[in-house]
Image (tube, rainbow, N blue to C red):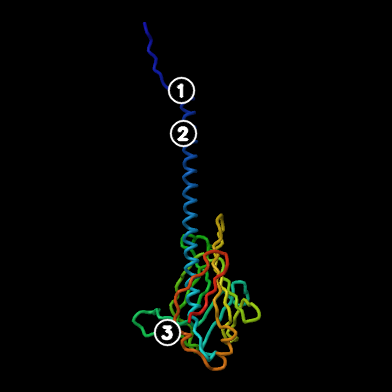
Amino acid sequence: MTTLRNKGFTLAEVLVASTISAFIAMVAVGALKAVSDSAEIVNRASETTSEVRFAARMLARDLANLYRDPDPKNMKLVGASQENATAGPASLTFYAVGRAKARSEQPEGDVYEVEYILGRTYQEEEAADPEAESMTLFRRLWPNPDKDRSPGGVLTAIAEDISIFQVRFYDGQQWADEWPEEMESVPELIEVTLGYLPEERGEPVIESFIAIGVRASERSFFMSGSGDRRENEPREDTSVSESSGPQNVVSPGR
């Protein structure tokens, strides 16, 4: 008489197979997470690079349209670098000429007060952490500026997670990291550096350029009381260097 026996897996075999399957699943999940994290870092770096370049080009364009007048009291350029701890937050304020209106359907002149300032913002997703904050570069555009009134205008965030906002001013003899209002003049050169330094892995993003304020020959020309009104015609958009390589000089158009 033939005895039939049910063939199946033993408990030990089932346990070994389950362990191997769990190990393979853990490896697969880890690999997928690594790929996802890498893609997120690349996307974030690309977005940050675009924001830094956009902000640098906008600032360069505004400086190229710097307002000039034979009377120094009608001009304005005040700034302080990020490294200057005594002057407050890093900022750059000046009069510029432009055709684009800041406010639709409202009367405006062609001279605006433009301010770039580095301020702190709190991330919504990190609201649980009171110390969670990032630096944002803001641009304030004030139509019809008046030195006798409190500053106003339209405030816009143009770049987030900015780690570097350095401004230097050249007066013809030396560089300084502050240009106070008491100067009542425009420097010959203005060097601006914007950058992002990643907290984790990744390459820093640095954009730097030099804008021409008033040349030495033009300084005496303005101070003498004669000036060329065509100097205040709005100029075309300018570009800045796309890396931390040689600096680009933004000069006034003629």
> The N terminus appears in which quarter of the rendering?
top left
Instruction: Work out whether mark 1 precedes mark 2 in sequence or the reverse, and give the earlier one.
Output: 1
Q: Are marks 3 and 2 in contact (CB under 8 Å)?
A: no
The amino acid on which the numbered mark 2 sits, given as a three-letter code, is: Ser
The amino acid on which the numbered mark 3 sits, given as a three-letter code, is: Asp
The residue tagged 1 is 10
The residue tagged 3 is 110
Instruction: Work out whether mark 1 precedes mark 3 in sequence or the reverse, and give the earlier one.
Output: 1
* Residue 19 percent location from the top left of the image: 49, 32
The residue tagged 2 is 21
* Residue 39 percent location from the top left of the image: 47, 52
The amino acid on which the numbered mark 1 sits, given as a three-letter code, is: Thr
Residue at x-position 40% and y-position 18%: 7
Q: Quadrant of residue 106?
A: bottom left
Hey, which residue is sitting farthest bottom in the picture?
225
* Residue 23 percent location from the top left of the image: 50, 36
